Image: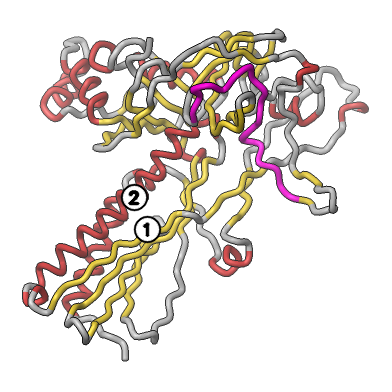
Amino acid sequence: MSNNFAKEEVVAFEQIVEGFSDALVVSNLVNVFKTDSVQMERANNIISRPMPYVAVSYEGTDMTANFSGYTQLTVPATLSRQRSVPLFLSATELRDMLQEQRLQTSAHQKIASDINYSLAYAASMQGTVVAATTATAKVSGFDGPALASTMLNENGVNDFDRYLLLNSNDYQGIASELGTRANLNTGKTLTAYERASVGDVAGFSAYRADYGIRKTAKAGSGITVDTRTNAANYHTPRATSTAATGEISNVDNRYQSITVSSTTSVVAGDAFTIAGIESAHLIAKTGTGRLKTFRVISVTDPTHMVISPPIISAQGATRAELQYQNCIVTPASSASIVFLNTQTCTINPFWVKNAIELLPGQYNIPMNAGAFIMKGVTDQGVQITMQKQYDIKTTETMYRFDSFWGVCVVNPEMCGALLYGQT
């Protein structure tokens, strides 16, 4: 027989779910794609999400030779994050109902933090636009967001719905610098001084996080890569691939495996540039005069690593390369790789809203299996489930709180990492 919830417990749960919505700060700053539970179960919790089209234009009036189909790129989005908070209360502890409510609140706070952190971590480790400055936030705090904003502008990324998540130390540093500027609006300067509030900066809506993703310094140098056409260290976008047995599957074009002289001491998350590879405007295809920044996704073996974004340089001269070209290459047999994370620091992720998606998942828990269940859904569509069951052997009541979601960086070139204090 199910264990029923008291009226006080139901009211408390509803209030906590409302608070849970408020606590999901970062999830309000990304796109939310609501999935169908049956479809996701049948597809092993994976769904393909489309990347934006980029058009190709040609000079002249005769387009006879230029008609061709467009390559639609997709990325796999996965429901893969599951968090549960299990706890129990004894018969004596349940004499104080506030004890139960406090534990419920702490469980919801923890799960909300897990969701926020998963989004921030994805942006921090997969964002490929890396703005590294030598100064600290306190010395020249504006320069970091300004550089990040400029790099997004140069890539042709829309200039609205931009967000910057600063760790507490760098946020306070920017507020400190702002608070000393007498030539700014009195209200903004005073707010920075009194409340350490940054607000909007360099086109970003800035938020403060009380946690941060640390990035260790990359040790060593001297790694090179062959960027000549015959070395094939460039990427040709493909919508699908066909296996030897005939099966067709979607291709994830966010990543590329490249051959380098060595991967010694290289780790996932490292940021780097390659000599002679210039960033290109994603729509106009013109050079920016700035080296393209890349991230290491994984290290395969002593001479191969997976990077993002792929080097789409049009060296293969296919329509798909022209469509999605993101860089201009001056070929060299041993182009130097220069790492940007030269000092251990806390990453400040930034992104454009539609670059990252939150995929809320759902559990279908039997209602007559011996435990009583309550479900709530936040404004973002994230489900929070509470279960309760009494154990007659121990006189303890067990509770568990669960949530299920996925995070997908749809376009890594529309999000990145701000690193202060690099040399």
Indicate the quadrant containing the C terminus: top left, top right, bottom left or bottom right: top left
Q: Which residues are magenta?
A: 249-267
Is residue 142 shown left or right of residue 147?
A: left
312 part of magenta stretch: no
Nearer to us in this view, 13 or 394 = 394
Residue 22 in percent (x, y) is at: 27, 52
Nearer to us in this view, 229 or 219 = 219
Point out which mark residue 31 bears.
Answer: none
Q: Which residue is at a point 80% across and 17% down the rendered structure image?
A: 230
- Count numbered badges in the picture: 2
Image-quadrant location for residue 375: bottom left
The residue tagged with tag 2: helix, strand or loop? helix
Q: Amino acid at mark 1?
A: Arg
Q: Amino acid at mark 2?
A: Asp
Residue annotated with mark 2: 114
Is residue 59 shown left or right of residue 147?
A: right
Q: Is residue 308 above or below residue 110?
A: above
Please say which color scheme the image uses: secondary structure
Residue 8 in percent (x, y) is at: 16, 76
Q: Which residue is at a point 60% across and 16% down the rendered structure image?
A: 279
Residue annotated with mark 1: 83
Q: Are marks 2 and 1 in contact (CB under 8 Å)?
A: yes
Q: Residue furthest right?
A: 64
**Label 1, residues with CA under 10 Å away: few <14, some 14-19, many ≥20:** some
266 part of magenta stretch: yes
Residue 40 in percent (x, y) is at: 58, 63
Mark 2 to mark 1 CA distance (whole Å): 8 Å
The residue tagged with tag 1: helix, strand or loop? strand
Q: Which residue is at a point 41% across and 39% down the rendered structure image?
A: 121
Q: Is residue 245 above or below residue 300?
A: below
Image-quadrant location for residue 258: top right
Q: Main secondary structure of the magenta part?
A: loop
